[in-house]
Image (spheres, rainbow, N blue to C red):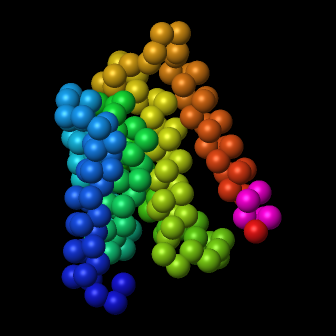
Amino acid sequence: PNSMPFCMVGAAMLWVGWFGFNAGSNLEANGDTTLAFINTFIATAAATVAWAILEGIVRGKASMLGAASGMVCGLVAVTPACGFIGPMGAIALGAVASALCYFFVAVVKPAVGYDDSLDVFGIHGIGGIVGAVGTGILTSAALGGIGYGEGVTMASQTWVQILSVLVTIAWSGIGSLIL
């Protein structure tokens, strides 16, 4: 970014707008909407703090660009899970997603050398994968989530989430290859 103040204004606008995306998707104002709203806020805050802490440890100081990256990572990761997990699960999901995204942005991308100038894969791709798989795990009532449907277990739901991620990766890869 050529202007960190504009970057932070844009990131803040994105965060506020994301509430309409996650909580607003419920199409009514009730407890489910509140859960999605709270989880969107908490996971994003946890991801932002986790990224800043990691960056501070690894680089010696945190940056506002890193905080904005962590924020986007948290928003992406919590989206599939926001109506199904509890607030403590949202903290865990945001922190784990942020750590993995930071690893892909700071370690994997330079080591492999792939072209990802805006860290789209490192933040959106990895954050989305962590959020999708994390939904299968953190929906468990034992972990504070709303629980699974009748006959559904953590293992079966997590497998469905993993399979969905793999199908999405294959679909995107084949589509990109065709294009």
Give how far across and how far down residue 169 sits, in percent: 67, 51
In the image, taking residue 160 as reference, residue 175 lies left or right, namely right
Q: Residue at x 35, y 53 (%)?
A: 75
Q: What's drawn in magenta, residue-wise?
A: 174-178
Q: Residue at x 25, y 81 (%)?
A: 6
Quadrant of the frame with the N terminus:
bottom left
Q: Does 167 sit above or below residue 76?
A: above
Name the image quarter holding residue 148.
top left
Closest to the observer, 123 or 113: 123
Q: Main secondary structure of the magenta part?
A: helix
Give how far across and how far down residue 141 sits, in percent: 35, 19
> Is residue 48 something that shows in the picture?
no
Name the image quarter holding residue 28.
top left
Quadrant of the frame with the C terminus:
bottom right
Q: Does 14 sit above or below residue 92?
A: below
Closest to the observer, 162 or 50: 162
Give how far across and how far down residue 111 sits, in percent: 62, 72
Q: Residue furthest right?
A: 178
In the image, taking residue 116 as reference, residue 148 lies left or right, namely left
